[in-house]
């Protein structure tokens, strides 16, 4: 398995208005609060020639899932050597880093997302089927599969993305006879730039061209 080098982490919070955490399976959302934690990380793969770190959303979920599931699983990767960073030499140091960043967390804004390359985002087909805001999404063909994209221009757009992530986690059902998917890692949108989004938008508006 390839290892990853992490160069930066940022933690934000958001309010998922109207989302019922109690519907989530496996008691992942044991608290009744609507506060959501978003973890973003800048990293690169150690088995590629390019060592340019890029930002990605690592986690979106409740504060209880952040503390009891995400931190524990991510710390294990540091102890196992899958994750590496000068910020945290082992799992214990990673847990301390997360506690520090969580204490300093600020509300998620569109500016924070776009400054890290999230000018737009997309969900795959199975995720798309679980969200309630389908009418806004633009189909995007990527490597032979269809994804569904949306733009991030306002703080309301950022909040919508977070709410969709929680909807995906709440709506996920374990498929029979298939490898189990760890729910901690569900609800992570793919990053898109404006060029890719607008290209998909134009294609959707003019399918014959």
Image (tube, rainbow, N blue to C red):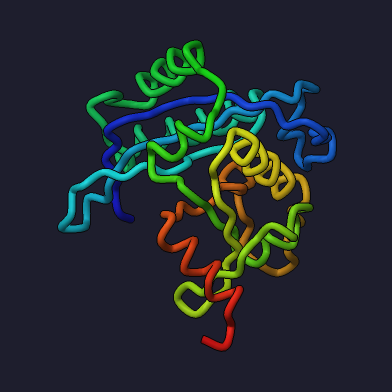
The image quadrant of residue 41 is top left
**Identity of the residue drawn at 66% across and 29% down:** 62
**Identity of the residue drawn at 38% across and 39% down:** 116
The image quadrant of residue 10 is top left
Q: Position of residue 27 (x, y in %)?
A: 76, 34
Q: Position of residue 172 (x, y in %)?
A: 74, 53
Specify the quadrant that holds the N terminus: bottom left
Query: Residue lying furthest bottom in this view?
Result: 208
Q: Position of residue 49 (x, y in %)?
A: 15, 58
Q: Nearer the viewer, residue 90 or 11?
A: 11
Q: Nearer the viewer, residue 131 or 153?
A: 153
**Identity of the residue drawn at 57% across and 73% down:** 146
Image-based side of 41 in relation to 172, left or right: left
In the image, residue 59 sits, relative to residue 45, either above or below, namely above
**Identity of the residue drawn at 50% across and 51% down:** 120
In the image, residue 41 sits, relative to residue 127, either above or below, namely above
Q: Position of residue 14 (x, y in %)?
A: 63, 27
The total number of labels drawn is 0
In the image, residue 112 sits, relative to residue 170, either above or below, namely above
Query: Residue lying furthest left in this view?
Result: 49
């Amino acid at each position: 398995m390839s290892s990853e080098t992490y160069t930066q982490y940022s933690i934000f919070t958001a309010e998922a208005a109207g989302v019922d955490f109690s519907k989530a399976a496996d008691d992942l959302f044991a608290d009744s609060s609507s506060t959501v934690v978003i973890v973003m990380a800048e990293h690169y793969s150690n088995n590629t020639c390019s060592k340019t770190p890029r930002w990605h959303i690592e986690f979106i979920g409740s504060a209880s899932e952040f503390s009891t599931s995400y931190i524990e699983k991510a710390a294990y990767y540091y102890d196992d050597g899958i994750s590496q960073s000068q910020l945290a030499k082992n799992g214990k140091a990673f847990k301390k880093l997360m506690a520090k960043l969580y204490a300093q967390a600020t509300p998620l804004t569109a500016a924070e997302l776009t400054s890290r390359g999230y000018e737009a985002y997309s969900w795959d087909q199975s995720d798309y089927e679980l969200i309630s805001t389908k009418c806004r999404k633009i189909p995007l063909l990527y490597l032979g599969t269809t994804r569904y994209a949306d733009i991030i221009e306002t703080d309301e757009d950022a909040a919508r993305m977070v709410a969709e992530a929680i909807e995906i986690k709440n709506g996920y059902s374990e498929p029979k006879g298939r490898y189990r998917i760890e729910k901690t890692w569900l609800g992570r949108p793919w990053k898109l730039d404006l060029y890719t989004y607008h290209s998909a938008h134009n294609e959707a508006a003019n399918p014959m061209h």
